[in-house]
Image: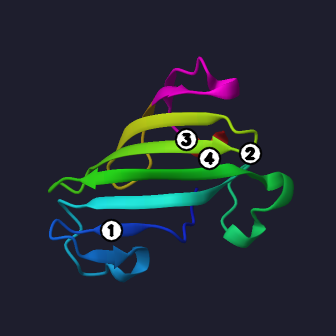
Amino acid sequence: SEPSDTDKYYLPDGTMIEDDDGEGASMTGGKWVWENNDICSGAIPDKDACSGTNLLGKASGTCTTFPSNDCDSIDYFKFNDGSLLYFRGMDEGKPGPSVVIGGTGCYKNAKGTTNDCDSI
């Protein structure tokens, strides 16, 4: 679900920083929040190219950051058919493995792990 237009970072004092405005700011101890980012088939680096049959649904979630800069992430994907898929994982500065928590609709019995969400 990258690139994203909706990423916001909330510092522990409640101050909000836009995704691209955080250069030089301490980005630990707070929370990333994103909502309704496009889920595209394959790796589409340009968000404007994600449309029509390439647009599979929307992704939303949160990620709590630690002083080490690791991020405890909870994500959910809402697909165009209404199915939901939930993930939980650690982001150590790059995408990492996630646990599939479960889902609804055609993902009702989903479980396991994933290493690369771009391949969904």
Discs 2/3, front: 2
Q: Are marks 4 and 3 in contact (CB under 8 Å)?
A: yes
Label 2: state its secondary structure.
loop
Discs 4/1, front: 1
Using the numbered discs, state the Cα–Cα distance from disc 4 to disc 1 in whole angstroms.
23 Å
Using the numbered discs, state the Cα–Cα distance from disc 2 to disc 3 in whole angstroms.
20 Å
Quarter containing the C terminus: top right
Kind of residue sitting beneath label 3: Asp
Kind of residue sitting beneath label 1: Tyr
Left or right? Give the position of 90 relative to 26.
right
Which residue does the image show at 58% across and 43% down from the upper left? Answer: 77
- Outermost top residue: 109
* Vertical position of residue 117 compared to residue 35: above or below: above
Q: Position of residue 88 (x, y in %)?
A: 40, 36
Among the two numbered marks 1 and 3 on one chain, the one whose residue lies closer to the N terminus? 1
Label 4: state its secondary structure.
helix
Using the numbered discs, state the Cα–Cα distance from disc 2 to disc 4 in whole angstroms.
17 Å
Q: Position of residue 62 (x, y in %)?
A: 38, 52
Residue 116 badge: 3
Q: Which residues lie in the magenta part?
A: 100-116
Which residue does the image show at 15% across and 70% down from the upper left? Answer: 13
Dot 4 crowding, Cα within 10 Å, few <14, some 14–19, many 20+: some
Specify whether residue 78 is painted magenta.
no
